Amino acid sequence: MSQSARIARLRDAMKQRGLDGYLVTHPLNVYYLTSFRATMWNVVQPLDDPEGSLLVEPQRLTFLCDGRYDPSPTRAAGAEHAEVKSPGGLRKIAEIVADRTKNRVRRLGFEAGALLHADALALMEAVPHVEWIRADELLTEMRIRKDAEEQKLLEQAAAITDGAYAHALKNMTLGMSEHDLADVINSYLRKHSEGTSFNTIVGFGATAAAPHYEPSYDRKLEKGHLVLMDCGSVFKGYMGDMTRMAVMGKATDKMKKMYAIVLEAQKAVLNGLRPDMRGHDADKLARDVFEKHGVLDKYLHGTGHGIGLAIHEPPRLKQTFENPLSPGTVFSVEPGLYEEGWGGIRIEDIVIMQESGPKNITRSPKDELIEVAC
């Protein structure tokens, strides 16, 4: 879908909400609408150091940005460029918004989750002639369902992530640190994509029991260690994410048993997914397997999360989430079991929900626990 088509959809959503204007400040949403990517594009920026914002009206687009950036992508999307010079960005942005909305906009939507509280208060004080309406959901809901082009980009990100795992297996050696192996993965991702979609997780043995873990410089790979690797690429802004396991040497019976249970749980979800089923129902498929085996207490997180321009976005596969897994949604399926002092096992794939059912775009082998010769 073109940027102009996305802007047209946003304008339709604005009309339905009774909004005469909409101020887009989330860097990912600005990119989604215009192809303009800020340097700190995953971070909400203070308006006194503005990366780029977009004022959307029914008949006009205004891109607010300082001279550090090339605004040509936004011009291609049909936006006028209003330069914001630093310092004083907040004051200038307020002036532009006030001028462009005067006698034109009564109800102005904004992204409360993508503005610092102090900036939001200052804008409201400086532009009092409009009613400021919190409307974060407009773009959140638009981005949930990925179009065909977005799905292709996510498939490419998944393929690069597959390559990183294969590269890690080839370069896994006794005595290397968790940080060393993470660097092997990160170097591959930087070479073949725009970088890492999050801080790569590598855990050896007992440290794999922490689902979100920072690799250590000091913990060394020993014979018999479980190895958990969770990583993802970035391709044209779209994220990859995958978790795979290995053992340095021979796997124990407990490792094989625990791995088989996690794999059974993941396959139960993958085989049970249906278009428009609820996130909590998908999550329950994994929990039922763990409960059957008496290990539900070792499951520490939800079964999955949406993925796209952000590494975690709607929909969610969690106990309390009613969100439907509609055609076009893209999400992870990543059950895991964790035991303090022993380690953890997680298996994660990325799925595109299609009209006909789920399409798994992660290709790395998982049918048995891989043993690395040492």
Image (tube, helix red, strand yellow):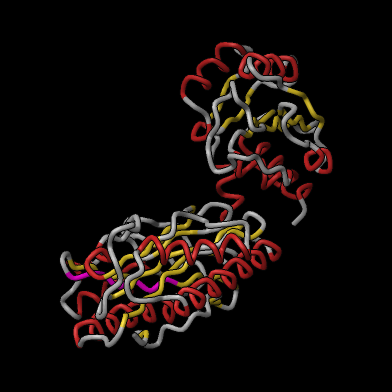
Camera-side residue of 247 and 44: 247
Q: Is residue 53 left or right of residue 363?
A: right
Decide whether residue 112 is among the magenta residues: no
Look at 58% across and 78% down and name the residue there: 356
Camera-side residue of 317 and 53: 53
Q: Is residue 210 left or right of residue 93?
A: left
Look at 43% across and 63% down and name the residue there: 182
| 281 vs 266: above or below | above
Q: Quadrant of residue 95?
A: top right
> Is there any visible trace of residue 278 in the rendered image?
no
Please tell me how many numbered marks the rendered image carries.
0
Camera-side residue of 325 and 157: 157
> Is there any visible trace of residue 183 in the rendered image?
yes
Q: Position of residue 68 (x, y in %)?
A: 72, 31
| 79 vs 363: above or below | above
Q: Position of residue 83 (x, y in %)?
A: 76, 23
Look at 38% across and 76% down and name the residue there: 173
Q: Which contiguous range is marked in magenta?
A: 342-348
Q: Position of residue 66 (x, y in %)?
A: 71, 26
Which quadrant does the C terminus fall into?
bottom left
Q: Position of residue 249 (x, y in %)?
A: 30, 85
Look at 59% across and 70% down and name the residue there: 160
